[in-house]
Image (cartoon, rainbow, N blue to C red):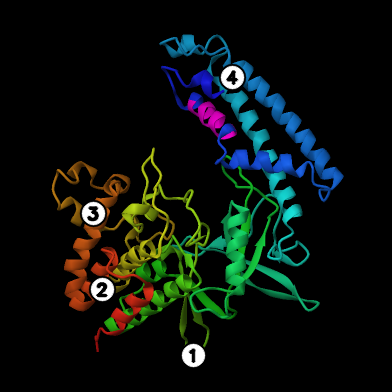
Amino acid sequence: MYERVQDSRNLDETLGRYRQLGLAIHDKNSYLYAHLDALHMASRNSAIPPNLKDELDASLERCKQSQDRAIKELEKYDPSRTFAKWAYGFAGKDSLRKKYDRFESDLNQVEKLCFRMNLVQQNSSNLLRPDYFKLVHETAESQPGETLPISDIWVAAGNYSDTGTRHDGDYVVEKKYVENDVRSLCDILRRASVPTPGILPCLGYRQPLYNDQSPPYRSFLQLIMELPADTDRQSLAYRLDTEAAPTLPDRLALAKDLVSAVNNVHRLKLVHKSIRSRAILLTTDRKPESSYHIFLQDWTYVRTQTAATSQNGGEDAWQTRIYQHPERQHTADQWPEVAYEPKHDIYSLGVVLMEILLWTPFVERCDSANLHAELRVATLYQDTVLGMGEEIMPSRYKGNSQKLTRFPMVIRDVWTSIARNDVTRVNAELGDVVVACLEGGYASAQEVLEALSRVDVS
C-alpha cells in the first residue's frame, strides 16, 4: 500500500491517507501495529473467552477483506501519470476514498476489540468494573456531563459502590488512549498520600460504552478523579476572564498555591506536561467563610520522569503551544527529541504565573459576551510579537493566532519580554521570578516556591 503511492507525482489527501496507513501497519512504534501484535498474542491466551475470540476472528476477516478491496482499487492508480484524472483511472478518486473509509472503519473495530482483550488480560486493580462505578445517564451513544465554562475540564455525575452502598458524587473524567500510561499513572496517584494538595483523589480508570464522536472514532479509556462535595468549581482561565483582579497579595497567594501543586506532582516523580490555565481547577467551599483549593487537571499525557516521550496530544494547537517549552514543541515533520523534564513544567508554570500576576488570560474569547466564543491569542501577546518587527513577525499575521504562535523561540522571547516589562511594573521581584522560570533558572518547583515566599508585597 505504501509502495504503491510513495513515488506519486500527485500525493493528495486521499493518497496521503493510504500512505500513512501503510506506514502504520508496518511501523513497530505505531498504535495500529501494537494493537495487531496484542491481538496476535491474545489469540493464544486461554483467559480470553471463546465468544470474544470468535468476535475477533470475524472482525479480522472483515478487515482482511476490506484491505484486499482497497489494495485492488489502489492498483488501478497509476503514479507515473502527471494528470490526476488519468492517474486515478476510470474508477476515480471517490471509489478509492470509499474503499479506504471501509478499511479504516474495520480497523477501528479491531482496535476496540484490542481494548476489550487487553482489559481481560491485564485485570488491573485500578480498572473500575461496570458494577462498581457508573456515570449517571450514560448510554452507548454519548458521554454524560459537560466541560466547565472556559476550560478543558469535563465533569460528570456518577456513583460507586462503598461497603455495600452507592456513593454519589461528581467526577472529573479525562480521556486516555494508551492503557499502559493510565495504569502507571493510577498506580502512582493511588499510592500517594491522600489528600495530596493539588491532586484530586484518583478512583482508577474505566472503559466507556462509546468511542470518540468524531473521526476516526477511536476507542479510549477514562481516568476518573473524585471532586470534593459541596463545592463550586471553576477553571483558573474562567476566573481570569470573568472576575475583577484581586489584590496583589491575593494573587501572590494563588500563585504560591499553584507552585505548591506542581511541586507535589514532581515529588511523585511525575511531570505533568500540560500546565495551563484552562486545565487548572479551582474549587470553593459552599460556606459563609469560603476557601478555595487548586487542582491540576488534564493528566491525559502524563509520563514518569524516567519514561520515554513518544507523542503529545494537542501540541499542534496554538492554545497549548503557547504554554510549552521550546524544546517540547514540534513541527509538522519533526517530533521533539528531548524527553520531558521538570524544567519544562517550570517553564509552563512561569507562563501561568504571568497570567495570575497580570490577571489576564493568554487565551482570549473573541466575543466577551459569549462563553463559547472562538478563541484568540491575547492582545498583549499579539502587540508584543508584532512590535518585534517585520523580520520576526510580519504584520500581515495580525489576527491569525496560529501564525502568530508558529515559532517556539519567538513565543519564549515574547513571554520573556512581557515578564521583564509588564510583570516587573507590577513588582520587580516577581518579574525576576517569572523570567527565571522561563530561562531555566530553577532546578525544581520547590525553588520557585521559595523564591515567591521571599517576595514581600504587603
Question: In the rendered view, does 42 fall on the left or right side of 111?
Answer: right
Q: What secondary structure is found at the residue carrying circle 2?
A: helix
Q: Is residue 295 visible?
A: no
Pick whichever of labels 4 and 2 is earlier in the sequence.
4
- Mark whose residue sits in front, 4 or 1: 4
For the residues marked 2 and 1, what is the alpha-carbon distance in whole angstroms? 35 Å
Location of the C terminus by quadrant is bottom left
Total tally of numbered discs in the picture: 4
Q: Which residue is mark 4?
A: 95
The residue under label 3 is 382
Closer to the eye: label 4 or 2 = 2
Q: Marks 3/2: CA distance?
A: 23 Å
Q: Nearer the viewer, mark 1 or mark 3?
A: 3
Q: Nearer the viewer, residue 401 or 273?
A: 273
Q: Are marks 1 and 3 in contact (CB under 8 Å)?
A: no
Vertical side of 216 occupied by 367: above or below:
below
User: Horizontally, is 289 left or right of 325 in the view?
Assistant: right
Residue 433's tag is: 2
Residue at 44%, 18% in the rendered image = 7
Dot 2 amino acid type: Val
Position above or below: 425 against 382: below
Q: Are marks 2 and 1 in contact (CB under 8 Å)?
A: no
The range drawn in magenta is 16-25
Does 240 sit left or right of 412 as displayed? right
CA–CA distance between discs 4 and 2?
59 Å
Question: What amino acid is labelled 1 in the image?
Answer: Pro
Indicate yes or no whether the magenta region holds residue 234.
no
Q: Could you say where residue 444 lies in the image, as x and y percent from the top left?
A: 37, 72
Which secondary structure class fits the magenta region best? helix
